[in-house]
Every structure is written in C-alpha cells, then in structure tokens.
Amino acid sequence: MERTIINPAPVTAKKPARRGGGLQPFFRKLLQQRMLVLMSVPFLLWLFLFKYVPLWGWTIAFQKYRPAKAFNDQEWVGWANFKFLFQDETFYQVLRNTLVMSSIKLVLGFVTAITLAILLNELRNIVFKRVVQTISYLPHFISWVVAASIISTALAPEGIVNILLMKLNLIDQPVLWLGKGEYFWGILGASEVWKDVGWNTIVYLAAITTIDPSQYEAAEIDGASRFQRILHITLPGLKPVIIILLIMNLGHILEAGFEPQYLLGNGMTVDYSDNLDIFVLKYGMDMGNYSLATAAGMFKTVVSFVFLLSANTIAKRMGESRLF
Amino acid sequence: MGKRQWLSTALAAVLAVTMVGCSNGAGGGNTPENTPAAVTGEGSAQQEPVTFTYYSFSTGKDVMASDTVIGKELQKQTGVDWKMEFLVGDVKTKSGVMIASGDYPDVIVPEGEIDKLMDAGAFIELDELIEEHGPNIKRVYGPYMDKFRQADGKIYHLPFSANIGYIGDPNISQGAFWIQRSVLKEFGYPKIKTLDEYFDLIKKYKEKYPQVDGKDIIGFVTFAGVADNFFTLTNPAMHLAGYPNDGDVIVDMQTHEAKVYQAGEYEKRWVQKLNEINAEGLFDPESFVMNKDQYLAKLTSGRVLGYFNYGWQVGDATNNLKMAGIDEKRYAPLPIVFDETIKDQYIDPPAFVNNRGIGISVKAKDPVRIIQYFDNLLKEENQILVQWGIKGETYSVDENGRFYLDDDQKTKRDDPEFKRTFGFQYFEYSWPRYGNNSLLADGNAYAVGNQPEVASAGYTEGDKKILEAYGAQTFSGYFSKPDNRPWYPAWSINKGQGTPEQMFGQKASDLQKKYLPRLILAKPGEFESIWNEYTGEFGKLDAKGYEEFVTKIVKDRAAGNW
Amino acid sequence: MSDLSASRKRYNSWSDKIFDICNIIFLCMLVVVTLYPFINMFALSFNNANDSIRGGIYLWPREWTWENYKYIFNESSIYHATLISALRTIVGTVISVFCTAMLAYTVSRQEFVLRKFVTIAFVFTMYFSGGLIPGYLLIRELDLINSFWVYIFPGIIGVFNMIVVRSFIEGLPEGIMESAKIDGAGEFMTFIRIVLPLTVPALATISLFVAVGQWNSWFDVFLYNSSRIELSTLQYELMKILSTSNTAANSMSAADQFAAGQSGASMVTPTSIRATMTIIASLPIIMVYPFLQKYFVKGMTVGGVKG
C-alpha cells in the first residue's frame, strides 16, 4: 500500500527527510510506517520496563546500601565505593588478568569456531559431519564444576597429559600444570575452547547456509583450489556475521566469568587467575556489600561502551557491516 | 497492583495482631508451671490445625513436617505443622532478596546470614513471649540468656548449643593429625607427641616401604587446593601450639589477650617444618591444586601416610575405608603438638555458639503459637524424641536405664533415607534444643553419638587394638581434656558487614593463600627471604586493630558479658 | 544433479585428498576430546558412589549400579518439574523466537525511521544491569513472583539473537521483499510469508539458543518461584537433590562443625549425583538436537538456500 510511495527512493530520500526537514516529515513518515512501528514499539516498552527501569539500582553505588532500608533512609557516600575500587592495589592486577583472559578467549574463541565451521563445511560425508558437529557441542552442557574436575584430573601429576608428554619424551618429569601461574591463562583459554567451540560454531554454520552454492560451482569451473574457495567464498560469506559478533563481544571484554577461574585457580596461581568478577565477589557480595558490586558493574558498563562504540566506529569507517 | 498488595499485607497484619491479642487473652490465665497439661488442654480452644513456614539457610530436602514420624507426633501435641524449606543455590543472593523484599517466612534459621538478617530487623524480640509462654525455654536457655542478647539487650533468636550438663564426644570429629594405622603397627604403636616425632615416623616408614601397589608412598598431604578449605593448612599452627580452634586468633589463658598467629612464630614453625619435609620428598605438592574428589581419592588409595584435617571434612573417605574393611589402611587421630611441654587442646571446650540459632520473623502469622511449639519441643520427653526417637523402635534401654542401639537400630540410624522419613534429619538440630554435649536427667547422653555405649559398640577390632595400646576407652580418651575457656569459640565473634575487621580477615587470608604454597615448596635456602617478604606484606595490614577488637570481646565474654 | 557430480569429480585431486584425510583425522581427534566428558559422566553415574570416592573412573564403571539413578528418580517431584521444564521450553521458545524475529525484521528495514533508535536501545542493554535486587523488586511489583510467566516475560527478546536474525535478513537478496510489496503485502504479511521461511537456518539457531537457555535455567526458579513446588523445573529439582546430597562434610558453616560426626555412611555423593544429573538433564537436548540441526548443518554439496 504505502510501500509503493517510499520504495522508489529508499536510500536518497531517507536522510534529508530526517535531518533537514524538522519534525513534521518525521511524524508523517512514522505514520506511513505505522505497521513497522506497531511491530517494534511494544518491545520498546518491554525493554524500558525490564531493562531500563531497574537502572535506578545504580544509585546503590553511591550509597552504603542496606537492603532492609527504604530508599530514603539509605546513607549516601558519594564516590567512596569507586574510590575503594580504584585505590585498591590488587584492583589493577585483577583488571589486567581480566583483560588478558578475555582477549585470549575472544581471539581463540573466534579463530577456533570459524575454523571448525569451515572444516565441517568441507566434509563431504553428511552423516559424519552431523555426528562430529553434534558431539563437538556436547561439552557445552557440562557445568564448570564437572569440567574443572575433568581438567584438573587430566592435568594432575599422574594425569593423562603428563603421561602422554613423558611418553613422547617432551618432559622428563611430571609438571604441576595447575600450580604454575604462567601456565594458567593458556590452560584456561584451552579449556574454554574445548568446552564451547562446538557451540560457538553453530551460528557460523547457519551463516554458511546462506552462501549461494552457485558461487562454489563457478569457482570450481575456474579451477580454484580448496583453499582459494575457502578464502574467496566461505570467509567473505561469513564476514558480516563475524564482524557483528566481534563488535558485540568486544563490548563484553570485562566479562570473563568467574567460575572456571575460581575452580581452576588456587593459591599458587592467584596472581594470574583472580579476575574482576572474583574480586567483586570477595569484597562485594561475600561481605554483603552490594554497593561495591554495583560500582564495579557500572565501571564495567563504561568500559563496555567505550569498546563497543570504538569497534562500531572502526567498522563503519572501514565500510564493513556494523552493529548500529 | 502495588496498592492491592499493600492492602492485603496490612490486612494480614491487622488480623495477626488481633489473633495475637486473642490468644494472649486466652492463654493468659495459665500459669507457666502447669504448661505441659495446659498446652494439651488448650487444644480444643486454640489448637485448630495451622501450618507455618520454616526456612533454613542450610541445605536439605524440603518437607512437610507432618510427613515425618517426629513431625507428626509433635503436630498431634500442638496442632502445628511446618512447611520446611531449605536453601538451594547461592546463600547471599537468597538473603539479599529476602531482606530487600521483606518476604520472610514465619521462622528462619539464618546460619551465616544472621548478621544481615538481624541488621535488617527480620526477627521479633522474644523476651516477653518467653516470659509468658516459655517455661521450658527458660529452663533450658535460662543460664545462657545473657550470652545471646543483641546490642539492645533483647533476645531475637534461640541458639542450638545451650548445654545442660556436659559429656564429651567419644570420637574425634574435630581436628587432629591423622596417621595411617599400618605405620603405628609397623613400629609397635609408639607414643608420639611432637611434630618432629610424627614426621620422623612417617619418614622411617616411607624409607622402609617406598611404594604401595606399584605407586609411590605419599608422606603427608594437606587440602589446600580449594579456596574455602585453605584453613586446613593454616589451622594446625594454632593446634600445634596447644590451642583449640579459635579461628584466626589464639587467646592467652591468663590475660585473655587475643593474638593473630598468622605470619607469627607458630605459623613459621609449622610452615618451615612442611618446607623441610617437602625437601625430603615427604610432602605432596599436589596438595595445593587438588579438588575435593582428588583429595578423597588420595586418602582412600592407601598411599597417604599422614594428613591433618577435621573429621567432618573427610567423612566420605573414612566411611569408604571403614566399609572396605582393611584396618591398616585406615587412619588414627593423634594429638600432635610442637614440644613435649605443650598440652594438646584439640578437643573443643564446652562452647556456646551465640551467632547461630532460630528466630521468629516479623512476618510470623502467630508468634504465640510458634513460641508455644518451641516450648513444647523443649520438654525433656520431646528432646528425647528428636534425638533418640521412639523406645523399642529406634533405640533400646537396658536394665540400668542406659540407652543403646541394637544392630537393627544402628543400621537404620546410618540410613539417610530413614533419618529423613523418621524426621531426625529435620528435628535433631536446627530447632530450639539442648546443646550437643548435654546430659539427660537420667544420665544418658543427649546426643546419640556421645553415648559411650553407642560409640564403643561401633568399634572394630583394629580400633580396639589402638585404644588398648594407648590405654583409652575411646579415641578422645587419649587426647587432653579441654580447659575451660569462657569466651570459646572466638570464631563466633560477629565482625559485622563491610567493617575493617572483615576486610582484614579477607586480606589476610588472601596473603596466606598466596604465600604459604610458595614458602612450603621453596628450596630451604630461599625460605627466609620469602618469609620476610610475606611478613612485610602482612605488616601492612592492621593486625593490631583486629587483635584489639577481638580481645575486647573475649574479655567481655570472659567477664560474662556476651 | 549434474552440477553436483561435476564438483564431486573435482574433489579427487591430490591436494584435495590430503586435505580431506587431515581434516577427518583432526575432527576425529576433536570428537575424542569432546566426547570424553560425557563418557566419563556416564561411567560415574553408573558406578557405585562409595567406590567412586577412590577415583580412577574414566571410561567405564567399575562397580555397576542403578543406585544413583534410583536416588534421583525416586524423587517424586521431578516428574511434574520435567513437565514444567518442557512447557517453559516450548512456550518460551515459540514466543521469544517469534517476537525476536519480528523485531529483527523491523530493524533490518533500512527505511524504518526508528531503526537506529530501536537497535541502539536494545544493544545497550547487553552491557548493563541494574543489579540483582532492583531486578527482583521489579518482578515483585509486577506480581510475577510465584507465576509461570516469570519464566517467559523477562526473556521475550534476546538481543544477541535479534542481531543474528537481523544480519540474516540483511543478507537476503533485496529483490524478494520488494516483490512482495509490489504484490501488495503489508509489512506484517511480508514478515510472515517471506522473511520467516527464508530465515529458517537463523530461526533454528536462535531456537536452539533460547530452548537450551530455558531448559537449563534454574536461577529464576530459585529467585522467584522457590516456594511454589508446582512451578519448579527439572533443573531446579536436580539442584535441590544435589545440595541435599552434600553431606555436612561439604560445608564449613559453624553450625555444621557441631552437627558433624553424626552423618552416617552416605549411599550417594555429590560427585555421583552431579554426574547422573548431567546425563539426565542433557539427554533430552541431545535427542531433540538432530531435528534442529538439519536446518543449519547443510553444505554446498547438498545445496543451501537458493537465492
């Protein structure tokens, strides 16, 4: 109906209408697009209610919050909670650990998931492909408690890893893998890949289905090799998804989780394993200090936004697909 | 919606108040002394069936009290049933939302969340209720009342450890140095008292038998790989110096000065000894990375010669070994100290734990009925019911009036499923009760496990051999009797939420976790320099302030002001 | 068909063969390491709990037993809880996937005036939260405590999922939607008739994400519905069983130190229960998976969505 009016010039007409024309054209347009409005605005209300309303909780960061007291009876302490956070010397160490562990997880996670998706895509036996894909995602359903127990059994002095390495003559006596801080980041990164690579692959596999098969056929007729096809068809086909996911995950750079670190870490590795979430758990929740936990949450949000907006801007500058 | 809720809450409150008023009026005529009869007598007028909610911040399986034998019996007496709920998931989250929303159950067992809930005003004060409706409560808690009043001088909860009389635990369920029985047997059950003797014996045995089942023997192992259990590595310093488990301090018997032993002379001596045995290959470095499963697997493998731990932490392993039936692979507790001259104090002195208990919440529908239920529960016959059960069914009585368990009854006692359906699981602990070390009026032990007849009936041939060698009737028999420590336990001192004291505790234990493994695994030559680094870091914390804080409360407690 | 056989022929060059062999070997190794945890859980779940304490259970039970399963299946509450879990998974997934896809469609329309605003408003929420207590108080104000809908409403839109679907729609050939509009279909009908069928791989993907999230979640039950047993879910009931199997030994709370020594020989241990519940809880997902999988595991040899 009204579509026919807009469609002829969707790209050129859009900007002048919003920027230059003031409010009148905006509302006219809104009216024209009432169906789209109807399809999205209810969710905006939902969003406002469930996600934005609870943000009043951020005031807790500026209080010495006691859950039993009413809002008006809380004691206000200004920036004290933030000061505590930024003045604690271990804070910078846990910040470093968080950043390093997240970066490892980000890079390793992306590379392995994309690689696995491509390798699966190159399989010709559809049954084998399905079986591999199903099994590879299984570890995702195992809790970290169980996973950590399996990992520490494998890495024990008499565990399978040491036995294998000894048999291969790579080491001459068992190594206490979990007892050395310098190994911790690597072990954690590998564990996370092991647990989630199959799961993370799913979204790329779905993206691959949208690649037009005729492209592959054309490439074959041109005599392109396996690697060339991957490089020039599969990867470019995945690029939009990869970039969008990358931008989103960069925003989560301070969210490294705490379970695996907590379960695999110990006194000998704390300098490497304690991250922001564990710090907040120790000095925030465990002491009933919701204010500190909230302040740390706000700090994380600020950092997230910086990363998110920079990544999005860079993508925009480079002319790639972007988040918004 | 908010309005409607508010209205209904208000209405409920008004109703509750009227009901309290009514029952107060009705019950007012009874003199406390004739309550046993009175409570049952009131039945018709006031005892129409009612169900209250009970929430415990410890784990367990939810149940309706009347679905258990004990709960049913108590319901018969009082008309009160309980919907009992237990914690699942994270305790801090639960308490946080409970407090923030004010949605309290009728009765709460707050466990470690007690400070938060008290602070939030979750409990009603009990003084008047006890005065009016609690003759038995007064009988049991009377001597202790001043020990659990809050800062405002009022009572808000009833603890679980009000002992009437005293009988010790025949077995070692608390801390000890444990040694594999084959070591004792090999050297003819020698009397060992000091840490040096203990490790010498282990060393001698390992030299003689370096391997078992094709695997290397492990001299000594600790359980320090899991953050929450690190205290099993740090506490021995205090025990070796001849103190009971007072947490992170030792308290002088004369001056009542509390002193933090971390980074002090005792800890150094203990850690340096471990460093030494590590250099000799007796210490298992995996101690610092193992999880609980791996630790228990080691203890049950027969490869470990010695370990320090609290009996309740290794229950699964000791049960496994006991069931396996190979006596030599089991362990025996030893009261090890630093020097010949030190008297061991592994056994807990009579203790009053005032920061655990049960309270009635501000949302309770009928506090009077609840306090009457508590009072009824504290009658001696009901206290026997919740501990021993029903005569002839769950316990037997010999001709001298002594309680014991026959084989069948013992098997039932050990069956967790039976404990649940009968109700021991739900009623033997987290309710108003006598303390564990109490004696019944007829001289029997209050707690089944403390009855000597029950303990000795459970001893195996191997157990008896050791007891004979050390000249004792029970395992606690060859440990020193606990001295009286009126402040005990210092670990129950409330440090408050987010206070400097709490912060000190966190920072200090972080340092321990970081440095102790390094110290123990270091080359002996490097020990001193790491130790200096450690004490330097520790020196930055305000240990003085913390000690002053604890000392003040210890002195208050010793003077009778809890 | 002829295209297909032509490509088959091409695969048979030397380097292709080597690639295939290496690929298969590598993926077989991956299968071994990713299958191991499940085999291990299987072995532990069928092994005598008391024997498992000794360790050394890897691929196969040492002392076979049904006890661990009996212990869980004897718990009468889990049957009804399984029903609730299934219900919330189905209802939650259908509603969430439909709403998320619809929203994704609107923000994929380049000409939509609110496009940027809506996208940003949603994306931002991925990076903040008001905190546990404000969230709880909101749910309480909305009267959603002790209600089934608390499983559904707060999670209607998954922002991540929305973005995934959006990028799929944006990848569709522009002409398709244009032609629909020329046919006179409104936005909603275009969405239903054209977009939904064409984004099946994406919908299957996010259905999987939402369904797994719904099936596994227990935190909302714990927080909001823990006192209404008839709304409890399988995962939560399993959590309860697990926490009950933790003997006093496992906790270091002061009260337990005093209560201890009384706990008898336990027939189950947390380790064996955890293994058993891992198997029980994940079997349904594994069984349903192939039905979803066929929508996104396709390849060029079978043919993708024809553009």
Image (cartoon, rainbow, N blue to C red):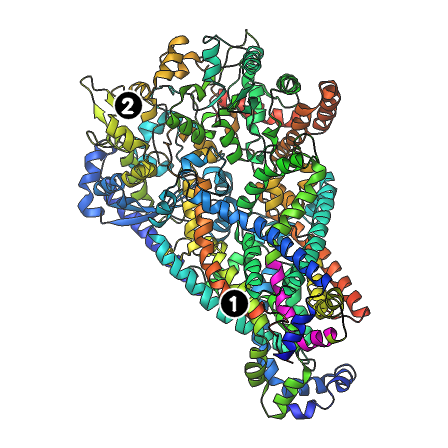
Badge 2: chain ID: B
Relative vertical location of residue B208 with respect to residue A159 in this rendering, above or below = above
Kind of residue indicated by mark 1: Leu
Instruction: Report whether residue C82 is seen.
Output: yes
Secondary structure of residue under mark 2: loop
**Residue visible at 45% across and 33% down in the picture:** C249
**Residue visible at 55% across and 85% down in the picture:** C189
- Report x, y in % for residue A128: 56, 61
Task: Tell which residue pokes out farthest to the right in this image.
Answer: A317
Relative vertical location of residue B199 with respect to residue A70 in this rendering, above or below = above
Callout 2: few (<14), some (14-19), or many (20+) C-alpha neighbours within 10 Å?
Answer: some
Task: Check the picture and name the quadrant holding the N terminus of chain B.
Answer: bottom left
In the rendered structure, the answer to whether residue B264 lies left or right of residue B68 reads right
Residue that label 1 marks: C292
Secondary structure of residue under mark 1: helix
In the rendered structure, the answer to whether residue B463 lies left or right of residue A230 reads left
Return the residue nearer the eye: A204 or B12: A204
Return the residue nearer the eye: B381 or A192: A192
Looking at the rendering, the stretch of residues picked out in magenta corresponds to: A199-220
- Report x, y in % for residue B522: 70, 24
Kind of residue indicated by mark 2: Leu
Callout 1: few (<14), some (14-19), or many (20+) C-alpha neighbours within 10 Å?
Answer: some
Badge 1: chain ID: C
- Prevailing secondary structure class for the magenta stretch in the rendered image: helix
Return the residue nearer the eye: B45 or A56: A56
The answer to if A213 sits in the magenta stretch is: yes
Residue that label 2 marks: B440
**Residue visible at 22% across and 49% down in the picture:** B48
- Report x, y in % for residue A299: 70, 52
Please give the count of numbered marks on the rendered protein: 2
Q: Give the label, 1 or 2, closer to the camera.
A: 1
Cα gap from disc 1 to disc 2, whole angstroms: 66 Å
